[in-house]
Image (cartoon, rainbow, N blue to C red):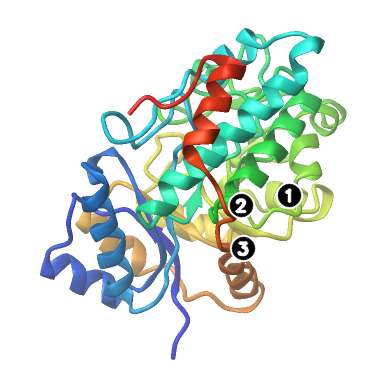
């Protein structure tokens, strides 16, 4: 039996048609990612995740971006919605509230994991470990888990462990750090001119501290101190820093190839990312024509990439016992958050 292809694919809608199912069977992506266009109600999402796995004939990972706050693909009326993370941090600011904030974050991500697991989603693209600056574009700043590297690291560990306790594997992002990006990489290419010492002390530090986690996602950002031309996703120099200096040996996936920070066709972007050292390509928009041309240039998982992919799958453990009603009540008492469905 051949190994799956080194790509994660999005799909077009809320259900799989026969033709789309046949395409996915032949493409054999390692996994899938869902977006708001794929989500209507819990029973529908559960049917879709089951259909995706049946299409490839194995227990493929199904990913989502359910960060809690600004970025959330699953929303009311069926799923909880959360205050943006900086607002929660502000609400519980100060040393006297540190324990309450940490417990609130733990409960939040444990509840998120509970909701994801219930519909067959077993990977969450979280925690975001980017350290914000005064000039950081809101696309990153509005999602930050902390104000500095130490706080981001601490809160990132809490989020990751809470997700894993709920049977959901985490993905750290955006390696090696997107906190200095002054523009939105969905629309244009950010460039960072900070020196290596500053990058090591601040930007790389949370990723190094959480380098034991099973999966990571690159950022489409040029770090001039590493590679003045290529964004981290397609830069062999940046990938070497992620692997050897940061020490990350987990499965490394790209951020979405469809973002305008990258140049070239989707197939060219995919080839460049694999050549630079990424293990898996992330193609999200569900466009059949784009998927066909991209899949054609993406290899099967082999060697170290296959080993890392297998280890990532093994990180999807069984959920520990959990009482969501009790968690909601405790969270409400800590922060005013709780059941909102």
SS for dot 3: loop
Mark whose residue sits in front, 1 or 3 = 3
Question: What residue is shown at x 62% (from left), y 18% (from top)?
Answer: 334
Q: Which badge, 1 or 3, comes first in the chain's sequence?
A: 1
Q: Quadrant of residue 1?
A: bottom left
SS for dot 2: helix
Mark whose residue sits in front, 3 or 2 = 2
Question: What residue is shown at x 54% (from left), y 61% (from top)?
Answer: 274
Callout 3–callout 2 Cβ contact below 8 Å: yes
Crowding around mark 1 (Cα neighbors within 10 Å: few <14, some 14 to 19, many 20+) is many
Compared to 127, does 117 lie above or below?
below
Compared to 179, does 225 lie above or below?
below
Q: Is residue 255 left or right of residue 303?
A: left
| Residue on which disc 3 sits | 315
Task: Pinpoint residue 331: horizontal percent, then vertical percent.
Answer: 56, 25
Checking the image for residue 164, the label placed there is: 2
Q: Which badge, 3 or 2, comes first in the chain's sequence?
A: 2
Q: Nearer the viewer, residue 191 or 310?
A: 310
Task: Pinpoint residue 220: horizontal percent, then vertical percent.
Answer: 54, 38
Residue closest to the far bottom: 1
Q: Nearer the viewer, residue 206 or 91?
A: 91
Task: Pinpoint residue 137: horizontal percent, then vertical percent.
Answer: 53, 17
Crowding around mark 3 (Cα neighbors within 10 Å: few <14, some 14 to 19, many 20+) is some
Checking the image for residue 242, the label placed there is: 1
Mark whose residue sits in front, 1 or 2 = 2
């Amino acid at each position: 039996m051949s190994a799956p292809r080194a790509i994660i694919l999005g799909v077009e809608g809320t259900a799989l048609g026969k033709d789309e199912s046949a395409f996915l069977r032949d493409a054999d992506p390692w996994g899938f990612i869902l977006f708001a266009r794929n989500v209507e109600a819990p029973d529908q999402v559960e049917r879709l995740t089951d259909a995706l796995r049946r299409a490839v004939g194995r227990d493929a990972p199904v990913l989502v971006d359910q960060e809690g706050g600004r970025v959330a693909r699953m929303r009311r009326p069926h799923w909880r919605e959360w205050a943006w993370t900086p607002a929660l941090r502000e609400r519980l600011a100060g040393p006297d509230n540190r324990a309450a904030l940490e417990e609130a974050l733990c409960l939040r991500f444990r509840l998120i994991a509970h909701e994801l697991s219930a519909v067959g989603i077993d990977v969450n693209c979280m925690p975001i470990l980017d350290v914000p600056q005064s000039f950081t574009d809101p696309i990153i700043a509005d999602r930050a888990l902390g104000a500095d590297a130490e706080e981001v690291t601490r809160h990132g560990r809490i989020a990751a462990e809470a997700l894993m306790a709920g049977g959901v594997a985490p993905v750290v992002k955006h390696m090696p750090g997107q906190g200095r990006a002054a523009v939105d990489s969905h629309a244009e290419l950010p460039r960072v001119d900070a020196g290596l010492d500053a990058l090591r002390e601040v930007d790389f530090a949370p990723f190094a501290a959480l380098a034991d986690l099973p999966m990571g996602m690159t950022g489409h950002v040029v770090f001039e101190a590493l590679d003045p031309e290529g964004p981290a996703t397609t830069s062999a120099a940046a990938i070497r820093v992620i692997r050897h200096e940061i020490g990350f040996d987990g499965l490394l996936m790209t951020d979405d190839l469809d973002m305008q920070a990258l140049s070239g066709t989707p197939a060219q972007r995919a080839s460049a990312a694999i050549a630079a050292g990424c293990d898996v390509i992330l193609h999200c928009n569900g466009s059949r024509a784009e998927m066909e041309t991209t899949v054609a240039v993406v290899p099967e998982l082999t060697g170290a990439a296959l080993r890392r992919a297998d280890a990532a799958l093994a990180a999807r453990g069984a959920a520990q016992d959990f009482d969501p009603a009790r968690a909601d009540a405790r969270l409400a008492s800590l922060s005013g958050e709780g059941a909102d469905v």
